[in-house]
Amino acid sequence: MSIVKAFGAVSPTSGVAAMKIERRKLRENDVAIEIDYCGVCHSDLHYVENDWGITRYPIVPGHEIIGHVTAVGNSVTRYKPGDIVGVGCLVDSCKECSACDHGLEQYCENGMVGTYGGVDRIDHTPTYGGYSENIVVREEFVLSIPETLDRASAAPLLCAGITTYSPLRHVGVKAGDKVGVIGMGGLGHMGVKFAKALGAEVTLFTRSKTKEAEAKKQGADHVVVSTDAAQMSAVANTFDYLLDTIPVTHDFNPYLKCLKYDGKHMVVGQLSPLEPALGLGALVTKRRSLMGSMIGGIAETQEMLEFCAEHNIRCDVEMLDIENINQAYERMKKGDVRYRFVIDMKSLKQD
Amino acid sequence: MSIVKAFGAVSPTSGVAAMKIERRKLRENDVAIEIDYCGVCHSDLHYVENDWGITRYPIVPGHEIIGHVTAVGNSVTRYKPGDIVGVGCLVDSCKECSACDHGLEQYCENGMVGTYGGVDRIDHTPTYGGYSENIVVREEFVLSIPETLDRASAAPLLCAGITTYSPLRHVGVKAGDKVGVIGMGGLGHMGVKFAKALGAEVTLFTRSKTKEAEAKKQGADHVVVSTDAAQMSAVANTFDYLLDTIPVTHDFNPYLKCLKYDGKHMVVGQLSPLEPALGLGALVTKRRSLMGSMIGGIAETQEMLEFCAEHNIRCDVEMLDIENINQAYERMKKGDVRYRFVIDMKSLKQD
């Protein structure tokens, strides 16, 4: 066991501040990682402020981790000290259930272990995330970061990246498909890049006409202003897939009508209940689906990282020193970030 | 053009009564059919009473039609006088769009033509359904009824049958899959039979414990009383598919939790909006889907008829004389039919 520096919260209103946490001694299949960069996900803020009512304090957020290996357990074969590695949203699962057998550890039927806010399967201690000097993770849940990826901008790929890549791959987006991406924040801008790289014709749906130029810079072929009924009508029945990244409750009905028969509306950005009444007629009369998707499995996350290296895809990031994290949260609440904050963990070491 | 006897409604409150309608002269690709049996679908009642606000009176309901061919147009090759045939929910579509190309005429991008309440694509006259002496239908939309099928009980296959068969086939239900059927009326009891014949382990969800014996007689392996929280918890995360045949607004959330990861909740029985807030977390955290499905294409309907002949599947019906149709509607409103009324059209001819 070792005591390490971290930043975390001790109550819903305390904000994130310096603290000490314990990291476990290396197990034989563990990898010890010194953290170089950590992305700041909207979930971090939800956990810190206990928006979902599930936070057990103290909480150390951070599940978009890039670092380098400092030590490995005796049975570790895939990594050695010095390797550049990543850790995403999960650090363990049962590896025995049907979901795990299918590479879907995120849907583990015995419960995946979150990188923070979870409970270790062996010693039952709480898990602490990436706003810290280092982390110890089971080998199978460590990702290899391709050499050609810029490390800082690769951090958000481990959550924002895989969250958008996985559903697009799951439904088999291919050249010629029409994909709409709803919302252009941390997830949405990655969705546009991935859908484009997969060969789709990509439309960004946004409430704000001002995002048009930016959306096209990100790779969108078209922009539809979702509050403009005429623009929405003009694209009725035309999309194969919609990737919905909006993180708050909104009305799905206008979007469902934009799908072709057999079209799929894929929700990745919202866990709160859908309040406006859903028009089931839109589903029934065209065999449309409303589906959800959550992050991705480990093998698919590795595939996504290779895909980013191959297609030169990166997350647009703004670098941050850890002492400014509470201000960053305030800016995130206002949507004032293009498109993801990444903490340079050198700032923690200098603290 | 010929004037024929029919039963129809002229206002939302008139009930169904004897009337005369016009049937078109045979076009070269038309089949003229004398109607022997016509099933009574809940949609008939909705149309008669204008529950959906789309009825143009007069309306002649009936889209579960079994009859025999009396004449064919010059270019008709598939049918000859004397053949036993069926007509379901649609009598025409563009046959040129992507949906039609994929055998999904029910989702025709230029609009399918309903058997009643529709508008003919060529002469723009209203279409009238099966509560009548005969009907004239484009050859491609006429089904061949296998000889071994009992004709009267085959009628509801053309709507209740295909509506449940199509989604089960679309998602590929196979031996070993766990399928839940929600509700056991005209659609639900067919869903149980089809899911069982496809090899699935079938569970009926019902609010009423009294339906247990009947559900097992229909082929269900298990029955879950949906109002019993303990029974619902016991089957959490276990189903591959749910076929939801409930025709009125209800809460989907307890059912969604019964699905495994990647599970699909397939709605066939409800067109009204979903009022209770949908818990998107249930979709996102297990990649579950809520999808709709509406009847089926013509080729798939023919496949379903052959499947019924092969597996000796029939709809459970109660025979009805046409003069009792309004009483039958009243009984349907109370759910008092096991499981489908079928009109013996001899009663119209004797009228």
Image (cartoon, coloured by chain):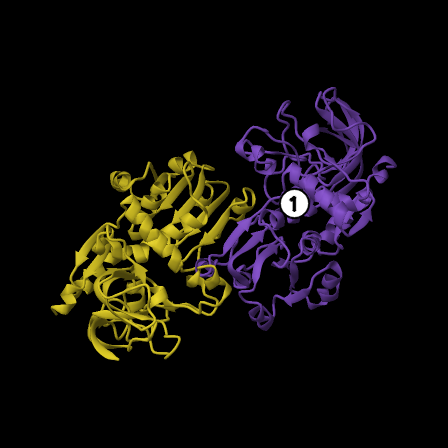
Chain colours: A purple, B yellow
Residues A146 and A131: in front is A146
Residue A175 against residue A160 in the figure, above or below: below
How many other residues sit within 10 Å of disc 1, few (<14), some (14-19) or many (≥20)? some
Query: In which quadrant of the rendered image does the C terminus of chain B lie?
Result: bottom left
**Residue B45 in view in this figure:** yes
Give the letter of the chain under mark 1. Answer: A
In the image, taking residue B121 as reference, residue A115 lies left or right, namely right
Location of the N terminus of chain B (image quadrant): bottom left
Residue B102, placed above or below residue A309: below
**Residue occupying image coordinates x 56% and y 49%:** A272
In this rendering, the answer to whether A76 lies above or below A111 is above
What element does badge 1 sit on?
helix
| Amino acid at dot 1 | His
Residue A77 location, quadrant:
top right
Task: Report the residue marked by disc 1.
Answer: A46
The residue drawn where x is 30% and y is 58% is: B144
**Residue B49 visible in rendering:** no
Q: Horizontal and vertical percent for residue B267? A: 42, 52
The one nearer the camera, A351 or B131, is B131
Could you tell me which residue is drawn at 25 percent across and 38 percent down?
Answer: B213
